[in-house]
Image (spheres, helix red, strand yellow):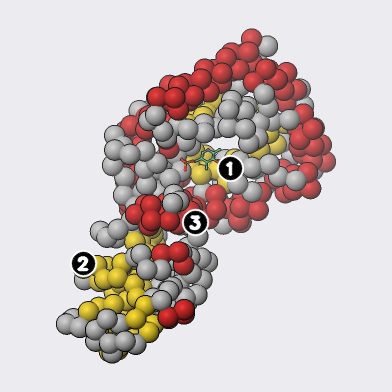
Amino acid sequence: MRATRAIIHIDRFCENVKRIREKIGRAPLICVPVKADAYGHGAVPVARAAIDAGARYLAVATVDEGVDLRAAGIRAPILVLSLPLPEELADAARLRLSLLLGDEDMVKEAARAAEQIGEKLAVHLKIDTGMGRVGCRPEAASALAVHIASFRSLVYAGTATHLSVADSRMPEDSDYTKKQVRIFTQSIESIRARGVDPGIVHAANSGAILLHEDAYFDMVRPGILLYGYSPVEHPSITVNPVMELVTRIVLIKTVRRGEALSYGRTWIASEDTRIATIPVGYGDGLPRGLSGNFSVYIRRCLYPLAGRICMDQCMIDLGNDTDIRRWDEVTIFGGNAQSAADIAVKLGTIPYEITCNINKRVPRVYTSLF
Ligand SMILES: *Cc1c(COP(=O)(O)O)cnc(C)c1O
């Protein structure tokens, strides 16, 4: 196996599940989003760990992601969060994936696809309470609920919404979330008033788990929090990063004062120094934008990158007096060292994007349990 690998600390993942469980109390079910290959952590092993740790539902973005989980023998309910094409519905029905739908046309298509193969498809009604992405208008929810319940080939299994600023402590954002929750609650009542059971009611993402207890309902959908990052500053629970990106030094050499390193000659040695090459680059998902603004950990000390990050490799300045050796381990993020959140801050993005982008080329190594 190559030097660059993502160690996936399943024990930390399970610990994070436990912390969230303690926070939300006994009642709400947990739905674990394993979309985008479990935020880059590997959908199948994470899904298995999640179920073992007591999660009842899994969520994916696409039907194909659901297909992969079923192919791995995972039998738990799987909710497809994004809208599929009509031609993907037959697979969804065949594999008993649950769909999140918010318009009449797709409900009809789903009913037809299920009927054609003699299966029952579970549908969750998605209500748009202010995210503006998918879902029906709140005032249309009860009619749509009646519509879903009217098909024999469909099971009306749940009702959901998504919160757009639940991770913000700004008063106006907090009010916006409260408004979304209020609208959602009223929609649920309007569905019950028509004599229809809304099924499992769910709304809370990681941000809402931390800041909005009134959004818990019957089930919560924590993503990033389970992977060890809080979307909220100073969270009330501690979670630990699950992914640790490591590599090893494959070469150390002396570079003389005035010599240039890497593409563009952006780095020039100001004195004689020892330079290490590590086999990780933007082709692995280490963002090229970190060039000139990043350090890695070797034996618990920080060393800066020297020159631009290449597709497959980059260089580190060890200084002219070092006992670091060839083949030594390097931690890029997620160990005791800096986290993907620190990297995200440098790039003006969020840790989700950093872990998601760690490429398929980087082998995932799972600790404990498996
Ligand atoms: C991705 C996603 C989540 C999880 O969001 P986090 O911010 O990672 O907790 C929850 N619900 C839906 C609909 C999502 O798409």
The three-letter amino acid code for the residue at tag 3 is Cys
Where the N terminus falls, by quadrant?
bottom left
Mark 1, ligand 1, within 8 Å: the answer is: no
**Res 199 label:** none
Q: Position of residue 310 (x, y in %)?
A: 47, 76
Residue that carries the numbered disc 1 in the rendered image: 78
Mark 3, ligand 1, within 8 Å: the answer is: no
Crowding near the residue tagged with mark 1, few <14, some 14–19, many ≥20 C-alpha atoms within 10 Å: many
The three-letter amino acid code for the residue at tag 1 is Ile
Q: Whole-Å distance between the Cαs marked 2 and 1?
A: 41 Å
Q: Whole-Å distance between the Cαs marked 3 and 1?
A: 20 Å
Residue that carries the numbered disc 2 in the rendered image: 300
- Between residue 300 and residue 153, name the one nearer to us: 300
Judge from the rendering whether residue 160 lies leftward or rightward of residue 313; answer left or right.
right
Crowding near the residue tagged with mark 3, few <14, some 14–19, many ≥20 C-alpha atoms within 10 Å: some
User: Which secondary structure lies at badge 1?
Assistant: strand
Residue that carries the numbered disc 3 in the rendered image: 356
Q: Is residue 312 above or below residue 339?
A: below
